[in-house]
Every structure is written in C-alpha cells, then in structure tokens.
Image (cartoon, rainbow, N blue to C red):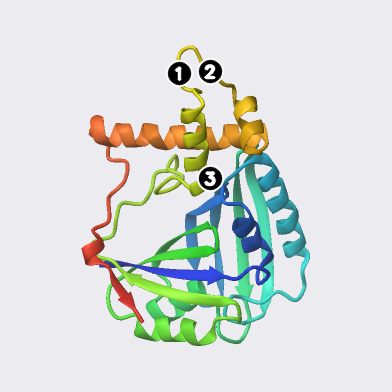
Amino acid sequence: MREVVFTIEYERGVDPLMDVFIESPDLYARSMQVQATSEAVWGIEKLIGTPSVLDEYDERLERVAQESSLVGMCGAPVTEYRCEMLSSNPESRKIYSLQREGDGPRSLPIAAANHLGEGVIMRSERHGDQFRWHLLVDGSLGTLHDDVRANLRDGLSLTVERLGEPPCLLEDGRTQHDLTTAQKTALEAALTRGYYEEPRKASVSEIAEEIDVPSSTLQYRLNRAEAWLAEQFAADSMTVDIDTSLDLGDVEFIE
C-alpha cells in the first residue's frame, strides 16, 4: 500500500473558505477523520490560527452553510451541506461537516470512493492556496486521476505525488510539518531584538510595533514557533517519534 497526495491549488476568489487560508498565512487545518461514499463526504477538521482569523473563518463558514447554489470542486451541485462546531477556543476550532453531491463529476474524496471503493483511507490538510488530500491506495489510480483532472472547476489546478511507504498519521498535537514564513519572521525578529535574552531586552508589544503587526498576532506566531522547536528537540534528543521524514528520492510526480 502506498500513500498518494492529491494537491488542489485554488486561485483567490474561487472558494470563500479557501480565500481565508490564502489571505492568512497563519491559518492551518487538517482532518481528524474523513469518510466518503459515492455521494457524500463527512469528517472532522481541526483549524489552528489567530483569534481574528478564526472569527473570520466562522463568519464565512456560516454564509457558505446558508448558500443554496454550492457546487463541488469538480462541478457537481451540492445537494446538502451541514456543519457543526464541536469545540472552540481562541486559537483553534474542531468542526464537523457533511457534504452531499448530486449528479455530475464529484469532488475528490467522493470520486475516490467511486473509483477505489468506499473503504479508501484518506486525510486532508489546508494551508495557503493548497488543499491536500492524502490517500492510502493499493493498485492503480489512473482513472481517478484522469477524472478529477478533467473536471476541476476553473481556478483550480491539480498536482499528484506518489509516495513510498505511508508516513505515520500525525498525532493530534502536531499542527504542521514546518514553520510558516510568518512564524520564521516572528522568531527572527524576537531573536535579533533580544526577546530571549536574560534579562529580556524587548517585549512582544515593542517588537510588534517595530515590525508593524498586532501584538496578539506576534505572540501567537511565537507560541507556534516555540511549540514546533520543542517538538523537534523531542524528536532529535529524546527519541520521541514525532513524525516520519519523507525521502524525496521516493517521490514520483504525475504529469
């Protein structure tokens, strides 16, 4: 069995929820559970972000749930869309959603259930302009690949990677594979201005004013960067299996 990653890239303005990710480099989402049949997909997704960005996502999600003319990523009409907030705090959300589609070319997870069988195992992640679907498959996926590529809506594009042995699924506390550009910039600003020196030479509010970002945003980015550094230390120095690295020599890109 191999892991295959379908990456759907979105142009701005194509999807109101993906626009929040495009506009907000700190926002990250991954599925905790995904199930799909030949007509519907449902699951639980965890989002991590700043309070203001998550509030914006909440508002757009509410509008999308009330929209009567939704279509899936491949153009089939959405006949049912439901979502429910399972948990919420200032820096994260857990959201249950159900999407059922009618006749026509269906979205990737539903198409996967059609082509590969309803027992296909999948997970997803969203960041920036990318919506990535990780599928565990045993056999050919040529017809699935051709079906999705041929029917993507305008403004969407597809890249497929065929990986080797599937990596371990991420634990719930793991939020991302690497620091975002914004988190790296925040960490560099804090380091160069003596934030981590003893005694501390600059506060978060002082650094935030210098680099022209809200204090709450800078604090959030530093918190996420520090959590990532702690995980790397645990993986490197304490023999804790945080994640499985990918051998780039074992990646095959499908044209």
Task: Tell me where residue 62 appears, x and y as whole percent.
Answer: 75, 57
Residue to which mark 3 is pinned: 182
Helix, strand or loop for disc 1: loop
Q: Nearer the viewer, residue 122 or 21?
A: 21
Tell me if residue 10 can be seen.
Answer: yes
Mark 3 is surrounded, within 10 Å at the Cα level, by few (under 14), some (14 to 19) or many (20 or more) other residues, namely some
Q: Are marks 1 and 2 in contact (CB under 8 Å)?
A: yes
Mark 2 is surrounded, within 10 Å at the Cα level, by few (under 14), some (14 to 19) or many (20 or more) other residues, namely few
Q: Nearer the viewer, residue 120 or 172?
A: 172
First in sequence, mark 3 or 1: give its number: 3
Vertically, is 138 above or below 26?
A: below
User: Residue 201: which disc?
Assistant: 2
Query: Which quarter shows the C terminus?
Result: bottom left
Q: Nearer the viewer, residue 220 or 191?
A: 191
- Between the residue at mark 3 and the residue at mark 1, the CA separation in whole angstroms equals 22 Å
Helix, strand or loop for disc 2: loop
- Between the residue at mark 2 and the residue at mark 3, the CA separation in whole angstroms equals 22 Å
Amino acid type, residue under disc 1 in the picture: Glu
First in sequence, mark 2 or 3: give its number: 3
